Structure formats: C-alpha cells, structure tokens
Image (cartoon, rainbow, N blue to C red):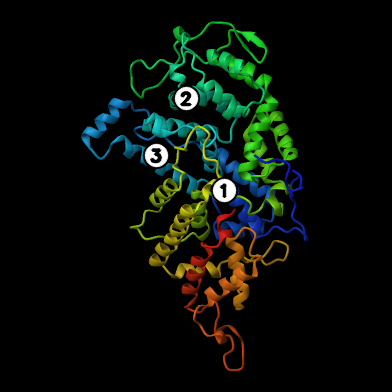
Amino acid sequence: MASDITCNLATLEPYVPSGTNPWNVSKINHLYRRIAFGATKAEVIDALNQNNPSALVDALIDEALAMAPNPAPVYGFWDRDQFEAAEMANEENDTGFYRREGKLQMINDLVQNKVRDRLTLFWSNHFVTEDDEYRSPAYQYQYYNLLQLHGLGNFRDFVYDIGISSPMLVYLNGDRNTRDRPNENYARELYELFTMGVDNGYTETDIIETAKALTGWVETNDIPWGPIVFNPGQFSNDTKTIFGQSGNFGYDELIDDVLFAQRPQEIATFICGKLYTYFVSPTCSDAIVAEMAQTFIDNNFEIAPVLRQLFKSEHFFDQEAIGVIIKSPCDLLISFSNETDFTYPATFSYLEEVRDFTDRLGQDMLNPFDVAGWQGDEDWISPDYLILRWDNATSLITQASSENQDQFRNFVLGLPIGTAADGNLEGTMASTDVEIVVKAILDYFFSRGVSDPLIYEEALAVFKGDLPESYFEAGATAPNIWTLDNPLLNDQFIALLRYIVYVPEFQLK
C-alpha cells in the first residue's frame, strides 16, 4: 500500500459546497459509486436539489444501520445429512445449487441495498473465507449473516463473533486447535490480516501463545456441518504470555483484555488504512488515516462514525480522489445498470448474469482466491479481462434495447446537467446543441469527464452517425432539424453507450 505520495491535500473537514467548488453531478456520482453501487437519475437529481452532501451521507448511512440482516433461508442451519436428504428428494438441489443461491442473494443485495451491502462486500474481502473450502451452504449463510450484522457496527464485536463462527473455524483450522496440539493458523491471520497487519505489534511468540488462548472451539458433537462449539476439555489451561502480559487467557480475555486493550492504535491504523485504500485511493495518506484512526478509537471501534467522517470530507470529494480506482467486476456491471436504470427482458436474468460475470473475472462472491483476498485495482485488468468487461457491458445495452428502445431516449431527456450553484436543477436535458448533449452524457459516465479532445471528437462522431451534418446546424435551408425529440435519438444514444463502455475511463470510478 503506497503512502503519503498523494496530491490530495484536502482535509477531513466537512465539504461545504461553494461557488468555486459546487455540488454537482460528478461529485454525486463519485459518492454513490464509492459508498454504494451507483445512483439512478432520480437520486442524482434529488441530491442536486438538496445541495447538502453531509445530510446525504448521514441519510445513506442511517438507512444502512436501520437494515436488519436477511432472514435465514430454509437451509440456513442444516447439517450435511439434511442437505443430502434434500438432494435425494431432488437431484438438482445439490449443495452447489444452494451455494449458488447464496451468491445470487448477495448480488441482489449489492444491487438494492447501497451502503449496507457495499460494506458487506468490503468485509467479505477482509475477514476472508472461501466457500469452496468449507463447502456447507449453511456455513455460507451464517458467515454472510455476520457480515451484514456487523458491517457498520462495532469492530471489536465483529472480530469476536467471526473468530468463533463455524465457517471461519473450519476455514482457518480453529476446529482443530486443541490443548495438546495448538494450531497457529487462525492466531496468525487474526493479527496479520484481520486486525493489525503484517509484522506490526506482535512477535512469533505472541502468535504461538495466542493459539493456546484460542483452543477449545472444536466440538462438533459428531454432526457434520453442524454448529461448532466450545469444549472446555480441549482448552489449554497453561499460562500464556501475549504482548508482555501473562495469564490463563481464554477467547474473551484475548479479544477484550489483550488484543483491543493493548493494541488499539495498531488495530485502528490498519483498519482505517484498508478503508481508505478501498473507498478513497490506492495511494494512502498517512495523515488522513491517522485522523480516521483516532475517530475509530474515540468511538470505541464503532465503524459508522469513521465512515461518516470520511464520506463527508473535503478530502473524499477532492478532485484527486475522483476516478482513481479501477472498478471491480461487480462495480462495473452493477453501477452501470443502476445508473442507467434500464429494464431488461423477462427472459434475461440480470442477477445471474452479474454472478456469472464476476465469477469469470475472478470475483466469485464469498470465494476469494485465498485468505489474503482480492487485491483489486490493477489486478482486475488484463487483456482477457478487458474483453469480457466490454462484452458484458455491451450485453446489458443489447438486452435493454431489445426490451424497450424508448427508455434510451428518456434517459437523455432526463439527464441532470446542472450544479446546485447555477440553479439548473430541473434535471432535464433541454439543449438542441449536439455538442452539449454528447459532453453531458460523457461527463455522466466518466468520473472525471473527458479531457482528451480525441475521445470527445470520436464520441461526437459516433453519436451523429451517418446523419448529414446539416441536421445538427441551424441554417437558412435546414434550421434545427435535429432536436431531442428526434426519433433517431434512441439509436444515437445506444451507439454512444456502446462506444463509452470501450473507453478506458469507463473502467474507473
């Protein structure tokens, strides 16, 4: 993680719109692409009219905090015998079927639930498990439930609950961690990946001693894929020395009295650094992270106050933070679909399309490559991946156009182009100047707009198509032939969208 090599010198003071730094479409789309998965035109227009970034951030986070986790599916606590019985009754309902259903539910939540499930996705790549390893669809649900439950809650509680969850115990061998044979796997990842970072505030001896404090969570009662609970007979009652403290530490004492009591600064700095690089920029500002970390500590490791501070800030809305992160596979499709808000044919399964697309591009939901998770950013891009990205974005355009072409024209007519400062808040594209129309469309879909005149000229040519130049120029013989009421606008916008998804800037958020 690069640090302190950043041109973003703005502070964490709240961003207040002004005449020289107005609240506009670019900033609104920036916020929604980072804190959620894109905004509809109606949401952008509403945000413009409100002209209050801090209030919008509070409303989005409050909405997320008020959401209850998904109710358990019927199979949410089945053991292996119950899954086998279900397959005997219907051979199509094997465990793979239920695991795919779980991933489909996650995709649906990402599409609909904005901040809550943006954080669910983030934490699934922090407290990593791989459902290919534990295989149980019930464990998959139980893990996902914890991500939703704690995603904006208390990080200490999150660490506590995830460490003794059945999927994590199986994934990192905690279910084999006994008094006679302590297993160091979870202890190592607890410090290295989940709380403090590599080689930061602990020694190899601390890991060995911590493994002893984690012993005992091994009892399955001979129920495959059932709950894993604590067995006092398998707990190491030896005195453990961790971070220079000695005692007969068990799980509760380890989390509360040792880890969070003795290493709050290391934990806060590491977690806030991950939040920063995920939500702001791959180039990390140590000074900003330090302020976030202090907020984290001051609020007893509550996650929401840190996010409020970050997303309201001048630093987050600085131009240097916009358009600097490469979209993940699910970002690419879900944000594009939410922003266009097109309808698709009933025969087209959009959720399955996203699930399969993300899988092909290496972002298999609830199943990252390894315990370190997806590294993101430039790792999302390769020649093969780019072709798939282009093809799948184009597929959404094709499906939408086969369902209803008028929705393309309606999108342009309703495109918000103003800022809160200039009073152009009606959200209606009214210009008959084709150059203004094309620029507004490009600015809407590209985080930083278009600075390359060649791209703009190419886009303009694509939009004009084969129509005579006289259509777009007022003159004595053909005044104002082309307007937004022109029936050809559908085809023109479809062609421009197909061009847009191939432009490198489209891959950025």
Q: Earlier in the sequence, mark 3 or mark 2?
A: 3
In this orientation, which residue lies closer to the viewer: 418 or 137? 137
Q: Position of residue 79 (x, y in %)?
A: 33, 25
How far is mark 1 from mark 3, CA to CA? 28 Å
Q: Position of residue 32 (x, y in %)?
A: 59, 51
In this orientation, which residue lies closer to the viewer: 200 or 165? 200
How far is mark 1 from mark 2, CA to CA? 28 Å
Q: Amino acid at mark 1?
A: Glu
Where 47 falls versus 480 (above or below)?
Answer: above
Q: Amino acid at mark 3?
A: Gly
Q: Which residue is mark 1?
A: 378
Q: Earlier in the sequence, mark 1 or mark 2?
A: 2
Q: Which residue is mark 3?
A: 102
Quarter that holds the N terminus: top right
Which structural element holds mark 1? helix
Mark 1 vs mark 2: give the one in front.
Answer: 1
Mark 3 vs mark 2: give the one in front.
Answer: 2
Where 232 falls versus 5 (above or below)?
Answer: above
- Residue 172's mark? 2
